[in-house]
Amino acid sequence: MKFFDMLKVLPKSLWVTTCNSGSCNGCDIEIVATISPRYDIERFGMKLVGTPRHADVLIVTGPVTKFMHSKLLRIYNQMPDPKVVVVVGNCGCSGDVFYKSYSLDGPVDNIIPVDVYVHGCPPRPEAIIEGVAKAVLKLEALDKAGEPQGEDVGDSVLERVAL
Amino acid sequence: MWNQLETGFGYWNVFVWLFFFLIVSGFVLWVRSLGRMDYKRNTDQDEIYLSGNEVPEDGAAISVPASSSYWGFRVAMEPLYRLLDRFHSGNASDYAGYFVVTTALIGLLILL
């Protein structure tokens, strides 16, 4: 196997970052459970990273409060292409019991494009792992297509671009 | 001008050093070229990540300076610091003047 063919294995390791857009923390605890020794998703190369600038996958929890709207947009826009978004938990998927709240701008797909929905309150770690595995397929498809994902979403693009 | 320098353990030669510098530079540039170049310029993708928050123009607005760890001391001594700040003009002639005056005062004390 040639050296650069060996390097092609690396893009299949997913680097994941999370954004809590107003969650009760239940989903986040389950996400942490997936990296704990029982599930240990890092053995598959899935690694939680602290910055969206290194991430391929954005996991969003929570129903997106008005306060978090701009933050979520900015985090999404700071991720390099190709990128996929996984929403974990009923709140992010639909707003759940908070769907009529005056303080929400969500659910998540009102703000940014979502690729995978993982339902549950909170979902089990197995479901989250399955969701991220589906994100792998989506990411591979995007990678093969090699097409740019278009412009940034929302109003978070820097003002100097508009000028 | 470019003599070889014998160190006792070996030698040091500027041309050998430059040769290895070029090799290392080439290696560093090669590693750098393997990095991602597909960030979109002039978008959020090349902006500083600050947990999703907007990066303020003035970093002091959100930073916690080291002096915060001795905040009480700093506030209690503020009159003195304000006085010392006035002395601190940034002009080297002023500092030379302080030195001369202080030396004269100490000399006077010693003589008396």
Image (cartoon, coloured by chain):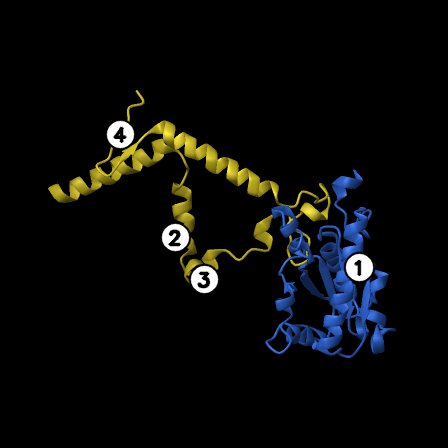
Callout 3 and callout 2 share a chain: yes
Q: Dot 3, crowdedness within 10 Å: few (<14), some or many (≥20)?
A: few
Q: Residues within 10 Å of mark 4 (few under 14, many from 20)?
A: few
Same chain assignment for discs 4 and 3: yes
Q: Are discs 3 and 2 less than 8 Å apart at CB?
A: no
The colour of chain B is: yellow
**Looking at this rendering, what residue extends furthest in the right direction?**
A100
Q: Name the residue under label 4.
A: B5
Tell which tag, 4 or 3, sits nearer the viewer. Answer: 4
Label 4 chain ID: B
Image quadrant holding the C terminus of chain B, namely: top left
User: Which of pointers 3 and 2 indicates the residue nearer the eye?
Assistant: 3
Using the rendered view, name the quadrant where residue A62 is placed. bottom right
Which secondary structure lies at badge 4?
strand
Q: In this view, does B36 lie above or below A125?
A: above
The chain letter corresponding to blue is A
Q: Mark 1 falls on what kind of element?
A: helix
- Chain that bears disc 3: B
Pick the front one: B20 or B2: B20
Labels 4 and 3: the sequence-earlier one: 4
- The image shows residue B93, relative to residue B40, as above or below, that is above
For the residues beneath circles 3 and 1, the answer to whether they share a chain is no
Q: In this view, does A51 lie to the left or right of B103?
A: right
Circle 2: element type: helix
Residue receiving disc 1: A138
Residue on which the image places disc 3: B69
**Position in image of residue A105 (x %, y %):** 83, 65
Callout 2, which amino acid? Leu
Write the residue at 35% across / 31% down: B93
